Amino acid sequence: MTADNTAVNPTEALSGASQMTNVGDTMLTKWRTLRARIDELNVSKPWGDDDPGKNFNKNYLEGDNPPATSVLEGGESMVIAVSKLGEQVREGVQGVVDIDDLTAEWFKK
């Protein structure tokens, strides 16, 4: 892929990164609240303690790789990754701006 020119408005990009960070932080907070509630519900075994309930628990929460835990941990990994995107964008944009400023200083017209 080639491009003749690529330009990014640093002010707008940094503003977008800040917004992304805020959304990521909110998303992570909401996820952790939801996760705590799900864990609380799983401990109370709302599906019952009879044979069908025990069978469900065995296949849902127990074993080497229980589906409930896998889904929750996978979800948490994704939410944490998304929550870090804003800061990564900010660092990238700021790095490019710093290099541009340094290059301009080195090669003054």
Image (cartoon, grey):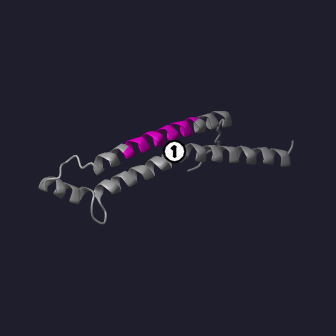
Q: Nearer the viewer, residue 49 or 84?
A: 49
Please, what is the three-letter code of the amino acid marked with disc 1? Ser
x, y percent for residue 67 = 29, 57
Query: Does the image show residue 16?
Result: yes
Q: Is residue 94 left or right of residue 50?
A: right
Q: Residue tagged by mark 1?
A: 83
What's the residue at 59%, 47% (across, down)? Answer: 88
What's the residue at 74%, 48% (across, down)? Answer: 99
What's the residue at 39%, 54% (across, down)? Answer: 73
**Tag 1 secondary structure:** helix
Q: Is residue 28 magenta?
A: yes
Q: Is residue 105 left or right of residue 7?
A: right
Majority secondary structure of the magenta segment?
A: helix
- The residue segment tinted magenta is 19-36
Q: Is residue 67 above or below residue 27?
A: below
Q: Is residue 31 magenta?
A: yes
x, y percent for residue 42 = 29, 49
Q: Nearer the viewer, residue 37 or 101?
A: 37
Q: Nearer the viewer, residue 8 or 84?
A: 84
Q: Is residue 65 above or below residue 14?
A: below
